[in-house]
Image (spheres, rainbow, N blue to C red):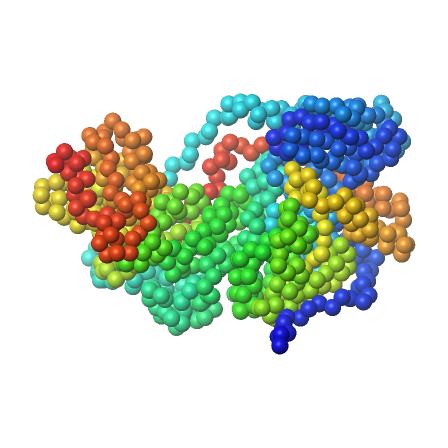
Amino acid sequence: MPQILMPALSPTMEEGKLSKWLVKVGDTVKSGDVLAEIETDKATMEVESVDEGVVREILVAEGTEGVKVNTPIALVLAEGESAGAAPVKETAPEPSEAPVVAAEKANDAAPAAAVPAAPKFEAQADPDLPEGVEMVELTVRQALNEAMAEEMRANPDIFIMGEEVAEYQGAYKVTQGLLQEFGPQRVVDTPITEHGFAGLAVGAAFAGLRPIVEFMTWNFAMQAIDQIINSAAKQLYMSGGQVTAPMVFRGPNGVASRVAAQHSQDYSAWYSHVPGLTVIAPYSAADAKGLLKAAIRSPNPVVFLENEILYGSTGLVPKVDDYVLPIGKARIARKGADVTIVSFSMGMRYATQATEKLVAAGVDVELIDLRTLRPMDSDTVIESVKKTGRLVTVEEGWPQGGIGAELAARVMEQAFDYLDAPVLRVTGKDVPMPYAANLEKLALPNVDEVIAAVNAVTYRS
Amino acid sequence: MARKATATKAKTQPNAPQFTGEQDLEAFREMLLIRRFEEKAGQMYGMGLIGGFCHLYIGQEAVVTGITMASEKGKDAQITGYRDHGHMLVMGLDPKGVMAELTGRQGGLSKGKGGSMHMFSNEHRFYGGNGIVGAQVSLGTGLAFASKYKGDGSVSLAYFGDGAANQGQVYESFNMAKLWKLPVVFVIENNKYAMGTSIERAAATTDFSMRGASFDIPGEQVDGMDVRMVYDAAKRAIEHARSGNGPYILEMLTYRYRGHSMSDPAKYRSKDEVTKYRQERDPIEQVRARLLEAGVITEDDLKKIETDIRAIVTEAADFATNDPEPDASELWTDITIEA
């Protein structure tokens, strides 16, 4: 039977005072009996017996201060066991063996084992389209709607839930017609209860369904962010690869128009921070369709950031049976040699308009649409910067810790020697969104700011 | 005039439902395994083998044991918070894998990457092991949503504490569960303290079985220290949910003997209170006494069971002590699935 060891009562405790013995030599003890009281600088706590037997010897007298964790403090013998018989082997390992070593290691901040290199994400190229494929003009809204409908036809485990997605046909009409085609079991109107239905959908994904959660806007998903990050994003890792949450959280993100601080915010950087999530923020109608289909098929939780202002904008979408784009691949919207502009989602509108003006003025801009924010296609950006030596980033979000900040860091780490100018960021201003029309305009990035930044990095101003 | 709450309030059972000797024996084994396992975990925590948080289930064994006995193992889903070791043991997960997860070793149920609060099993339909108070209530409601969607006849058993019962998403989930008649049993393990705050200091109304009243969810208050009462109530609740009547609330009046976690000295309650529960209400001692009284089993048989269970726990502890830590390459695995 074992020696009773001085226990650690918290992860940081190294020693304590053995303030009081509640048993004496000769006492019979059983599991759960309180043997002694121990004092640390924080608390007094009880030591319970784990084994049964007779207290044979008290090794540390009560009142002793500074008793190190894992020091033997008493000897308890099972009935009929003699003092000489194998004292320690049975249940408790020797003190000063593995556990203490482990604890010391942690405490001494000994150099950790070398960190293995992170696996490199390799995005696939966009699929080749058949020669002479018909291109159909669609709004982003129609493209998203088609993506969901096509995927729902193909897989009965896919359902969509959210506020006003069914009977009302979608607050922004993105789910129009889905209720009529797929019925109320698969197109589910929820109460106004983001935290609850986000969690419910994650649970349904654990159990094998493929939920699409529509947030009326991402602003309301703040109520649900715990479930998105703590339950969905981390699940695969903390279950050692066993339980997954294959699902899509989607809805309009960013600034709408004149809806003020609580309804105008870009969450791109927030979600792109989180390992375990895939974050997609398309700009064009074709990308909206191809990437939403990819997101719905993804085995991972995907945050799909749409934009209310872009819902009505049109673009050409290839008319093929199954238009799916690779997640994690940026799109080079225009090839150029003088300066790289990187943006995504609504930022692409400012960037595109600025590019048109700059090209007209003789600046050969390379314009990159990230499309996916996590995993981020660094390679495309780095290769471009190696060619142009200059980078301007454009986003609606706040500057601190933003997507532009991340791009600047990556370019500095991987292409520092190629830079001919500092990286400049064009972002939303570092303020909550004001309501007044003139202030709102000032708070947003604009085409002139993009042009000014390009002029600055090309030393044209 | 005050309106009468429409939810049904449980009646106290005049006579405790009886267990067969076989049921008592099963309950005894399961509960004793939890007790001995948790004591060993506490000891290993004291030796520095288990780090971080470690929430022991000692005292509450009858709750998960009675409910699991009333459920269909392998079919019904279970989900709980971070006081989860007992749930896994009763559901049949390998004690070695559970203990090795507590010590953060490669043979742990989550390869050492989850720890005490994060263990799962698709095979046994155990969905954690969740560290955020109350989150499992929405997740558990989602398991029930999936059951209804697929029509597989399973019931979701979502456990949470008296502390979590004050979280907003619990009521969001109650509403949806009733609205959509989802097969979920909400099990409130009321052990009287949310960490160090007693229910009287935290809850405007302390009868948690009535918390579903405004959603018309029936609720029962159950003696959670008597495994027969737990089993009996769970049978009713699970049957209710499985037959398409929607959710059911079971408030289990229970008690944890240890602190909230290993580093909690539990100074917010009197020693007398703890002693009283241990001596008069202990769930395991109740069954032990019944087994002996009814002559189902002899003292020697009991000793044999004790020895067997100790061997299981010792084997788990040895495995968890000697199993290597996860390989450093595991740092980068299981973040996302390659499509």
Image location of residue A146, percent across then percent down: 33, 63
Q: Judge left or right: residue B48 versus residue A127.
A: right
Which residue reaches farthest left? A361
Q: Nearer the viewer, residue A261 or A388?
A: A261
Observer-nearest residue: B301 or A437?
A437
Q: Is residue A409 visible?
A: yes
Considering the image in quadrants, where does the N terminus of chain A appear? top right
* Residue B7 image offset from top left, x and y in percent: 64, 70
View extreme (bottom): residue: B1
Please indicate whether residue A221 sits to the left or right of residue B228 in the image: left
Quadrant of the drawing holding the C terminus of chain A:
top left
- Residue B248 x, y percent position in the rendering: 63, 65
Residue B102 point in image, percent of width and height: 63, 38
In the image, residue A109 above or below residue A330: above
* Closer-to-camera residue (B313/B54): B54
Report the residue at 75% width, 58% height from top.
B223
Q: Residue at x 64, y 26 (%)?
A: A14
Question: How many dots with numbers?
Answer: 0
Q: Find residue A404 and report its image quarter.
A: top left
Residue at 65% in and 30% down: A41
Direction from residue A176 to residue A130 in the image, left or right: left
In the rendered image, which quarter is residue A119 located in? top left
